[in-house]
Image (cartoon, rainbow, N blue to C red):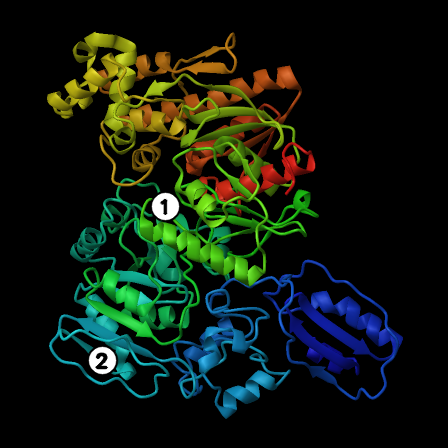
Amino acid sequence: MSRLAEQLDLTGWVRNTSDGVSIEVQGPGDSVEQFALELERSAPPQSHIIEITREDIAAIGGETAFEILASPEPSICKTLISPDLATCDECLAELRDPSDRRWSYPFINCTNCGPRFSIILDIPYDRPFTTMRTFQMCPNCEREYHDPRDRRFHAQPNACPVCGPGIFMLQVGARETEPIESTLSVSPPILGENSFLIAPQSVIEESAQHLTQGKVVAIKGIGGFHLACDATNQQAVERLRQRKGRGNKPLALMVPNLQSAEELAFISPKEKEHLQSVQAPILLLQPRMDAELRRWIAPDTPRLGIMLPYSPLHHLLCGTFGRPLVMTSGNLSEEPLAYEPDDALARLGNIADVFLLHDRPIARPCDDSVGAVWRNRLRLLRRSRGFAPRPLALPQATGLKPYLCVGADLKNTFCLVSPDGLAFPSQHIGDLETPESQNHFRNTLRDLCKLLDLQPEAVVTDPHPDYHSMRLAESIYPGLPSCMVQHHAAHFAGCLAENGHDGPAIGISWDGTGYGLDGRLWGGEFIVGDAVFPRRAATFRAVRLPGGEQAIHQPWRVAYSILWDLFGETVEDNLPHTMREIRYSSRHTVGHLLKRDLHSPKCTSVGRLFDAVASLAGLRHTVTYEAEAAVALEERCVRQSGKAYPYEIVDSLAPWEIDTRPMFRSLVQDVVSGTDVSEISGRFHLTLALICVEICCKLRIETGLDTVALSGGVFQNLVLLEQVTAALEDEGFSVLTHSEIPANDGGIAFGQAAAAAARWKACAWQSP
């Protein structure tokens, strides 16, 4: 805008404030009008403008130029905080140019790229309010920073090898310590007697050599640590899995460039676009059959998670190493992401052989985002780096007091809602099972409230009495007015709100488990209504989960429960061969629980049906991560199976009940007769799609509604999502799905925000 003002011979000033960007321009009327017209079109490429307000004022004497003024003291926050941005092409060209003063500098950036959210300490977004404040710019960087014609004009992280952050390496388990170069602005962490440091001039080459030798390298990135190893080295990958406690869960890959990605996966034009975007998410792609590393990177899964380098450090390391790298979150499984060096050394010291470190502080952790392209749109499964804390419009919240939605316990995010109708979903927090993750929730909430200058005056929770998110809300904000939004109603409301649909509509909310209004476990729900008054119209016949939580980790228990439901005490005489792989003593114990109805809660979850089918088909009797059985079943699915399994809809009940016993009788016969697993999976997926169509058609007759919203973690299954969507569209329904908000529990907080705003506006619960 400074350049634009100069081009039009306008005087005045511009400055960042915590309310946004304030501009005053003065000059001939036609030039002022041209400035107003061009302002939005000539805004920086990565800026995000919500609104432009204009006020005519009297001419001011004495102005001779257009100036950039210092920011005032922060007031009420309205400024949007930019997510972190992947390295732009112009910076990459300089990074690779031996004649450029920033050649091979791992912290190169400009106004169009680089860290933002991960370095901001306060607003407005000026260098003194970032973690770059300790790095005094050299004369060359200072000149760029103050020159309106330069690409680095007011680029807050601006730096070079002379004045900016540096990298160094720590190798664990050695006996000597080399002093590190004095160019580092801060001292490295205190080292144990069995560690030593390597000088930074050869750090990238040294790190690549360690990776070639099969070692695990912990890398301090933009928003936290990664754990990396050679993805083509099966032994190195298995060693990383064992140390991290990763089990069979798929690992993300970082490859040097797009050509390397295409050697591993089929990539559509839209997928290429998102891989190379400023958000640079991990993208789930269809692997090539000859991609051998798939066997140990993502066993029995239909897609490979691949990302391109998004920081200069990544580009240098990947370019030097030249092969795919495992690039997974720097933590033990179920723990928060490590982002501070001392904490990382303590928590990752038994996982990594080498630490690749730098001395630019990280203000807050932010994990990688994960998504998949379906029907030419990016569908996020994890919304974090590159997207957080970008808000979503929630018009129904306009004029309400600020409130907090604490989300679910798995894949947790929370959501802060402002009085101007903006919902700010947090970056990915993770599962809240451990004290460390709960503390991470507290710290992240405190941090985002401070950045946004929003103090909640009400709290929205899930009704599950054992959710840590609810207990955290009660401990952090005791006494605040509160509202509960049922889990699957939140899924439904979030899908409606993301698509700008107020309802009413039909909702299909399928997931693993969620606490129902009757105190039982739900997860296979058909909903009719809107965010204010959702009605449970249909559900699946409940199955029992013998052992409760154990049944989630051991799908064979769900399968055995269904068999017991079919055959009763003659179950052992009708047991398919796949189930005889389970020890008799274990089966006997589960049978005892079922016979006496002990510790066997009932559940309507479609996710648990996937578990049962995967176990009966012999794919997975136990799992090492959530949805492992369902993912394996999706991977084996025949997409063009024309024969569904039978089922019954009991519409004399309220809600209607979908009886899957006929399906499982037929499915067991398929298993016994040796039907291929891929055919069984295909028939099961098709059956679920036909159930959706039949229920929705019946509900359309009853209600006149022809819009269907699909939500819940089950709809991360792209095979099922496509079949259900296509079948509904063939029947004339309009289908709403998620895109920027995950369909899984990572989207619950936003759904709570949408439902609470709608109820508040409708006076369905008390305004604080």
Is 160 situated above or below 360? below
Residue drawn at 22 percent across, 80 percent down: 198
Res. 286 in view = yes
Is 42 situated above or below 181? above
Residue drawn at 48 percent across, 36 percent down: 462
Please tell me in which quadrant of the rendered image residue 361 appears. bottom left
Please state which amino acid type lies under the numbered disc 1.
Asp
Classify residue 191 as left or right of residue 95: left
Classify residue 64 as left or right of residue 363: right
Residue 275 or residue 406, whichever sits in front: 406
Please tell me in which quadrant of the rendered image residue 667 appears. top left
Residue 728 or residue 498, whichever sits in front: 498
Where in the figure is residue 16, as x and y percent of width and height? 65, 72
Is 382 situated above or below 350? above
Viewer-side label of 2, 1: 1
Tell me the number on the disc at residue 431.
1
Residue drawn at 34 percent across, 47 percent down: 287
Residue drawn at 67 percent across, 75 percent down: 15
Res. 322 in view = no
Q: Residues within 10 Å of mark 2 (few under 14, many from 20)?
A: some
Where in the figure is residue 480, as x and y percent of width and height? 55, 44
The N terminus lies in which quarter of the figure?
bottom right
**Residue picked out by circle 2:** 198
Please state which amino acid type lies under the numbered disc 2.
Ile
Query: Among all residues in the image, which is located at the extreme front?
Result: 479
Residue 134 or residue 500, whichever sits in front: 134
Task: Give whichever of discs 2 and 1 has the lower sequence position.
Answer: 2
Per the image, label 2 sits on a secondary structure element best described as strand
Residue 306 or residue 710, whichever sits in front: 710
